[in-house]
Image (cartoon, rainbow, N blue to C red):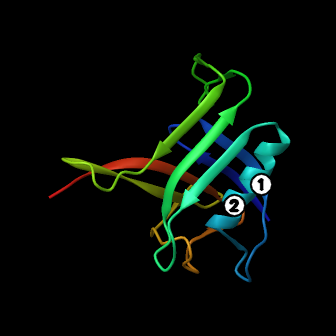
């Protein structure tokens, strides 16, 4: 099975055409996609890592990437970025707004699939040919 692309917004990380194991519904687990992206990045000399919280409500805590060389904006903008370390982490204690990671899944046509699930959930999957995007979002606290 192939995942069209995996992206982490904010640290400029993206991998395309990932090959991952699938379940009987031709879907890949979110964690398997992230592991495949880590391996594919390493083959290009880029270090990619992530930290998760513990189950039973396993969620993402942080993403890290180290680029050995500078690179151009992955969105086609004429911006050059320096090589080095890029890191973003959630902060559930910040006020007036806290930061939390959310992921978005689209099918191969680009149509969004509803529902955000904890990472160990059987429904935390991406369909064959689909895409997975992570964003760090701010949520207004009480």
Which quadrant does the C terminus fall into? Answer: bottom left
Q: Residue furthest bottom?
A: 24
- Give the x, y percent position of residue 77: 57, 21
Residue under numbered circle 1: 18
Residue at (80%, 44%) from the top-left corner? 42
Q: Quadrant of residue 129?
A: bottom right
Residue at (61%, 61%) from the top-left corner? 107
Q: Secondary structure at mark 1?
A: strand
Q: Residues within 10 Å of mark 1 (few under 14, many from 20)?
A: many
Residue under numbered circle 2: 33
- Give the x, y percent position of residue 15: 71, 45
Residue at (37%, 48%) from the top-left corner? 137
Among the two numbered marks 1 and 2 on one chain, the one whose residue lies closer to the N terminus: 1
Q: Residue furthest right?
A: 43
Say if 130 sits above or below 95 in the image. below
Q: Secondary structure at mark 2?
A: helix
Q: Is residue 109 visible?
A: no
Horizontal relation, residue 45 to residue 13: left or right: right
Asked whether the beta carbons under mark 1 and mark 2 sit within 8 Å of each other, the answer is: yes
Horizontal relation, residue 113 to residue 50: left or right: left
Q: How many marks?
A: 2
- Give the x, y percent position of residue 90: 41, 51
């Amino acid at each position: 099975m192939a995942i069209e692309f995996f992206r982490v917004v904010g640290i400029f990380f993206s991998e395309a055409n990932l090959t991952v194991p699938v379940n009987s519904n031709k879907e890949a687990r979110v964690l398997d996609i992230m592991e495949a992206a880590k391996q594919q990045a390493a083959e290009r000399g880029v270090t990619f890592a992530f930290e998760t919280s513990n189950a039973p409500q396993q969620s993402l805590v942080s993403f890290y990437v180290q680029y050995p060389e500078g690179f151009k904006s992955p969105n086609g903008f004429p911006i050059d970025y320096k090589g080095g370390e890029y890191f973003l982490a959630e902060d559930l204690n910040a006020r007036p707004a806290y930061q939390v990671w959310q992921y978005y899944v689209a099918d191969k046509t680009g149509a969004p699939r509803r529902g955000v699930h904890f990472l160990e959930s059987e429904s935390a999957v991406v369909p064959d040919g689909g895409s997975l995007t992570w964003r760090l979002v701010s949520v207004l606290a009480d």
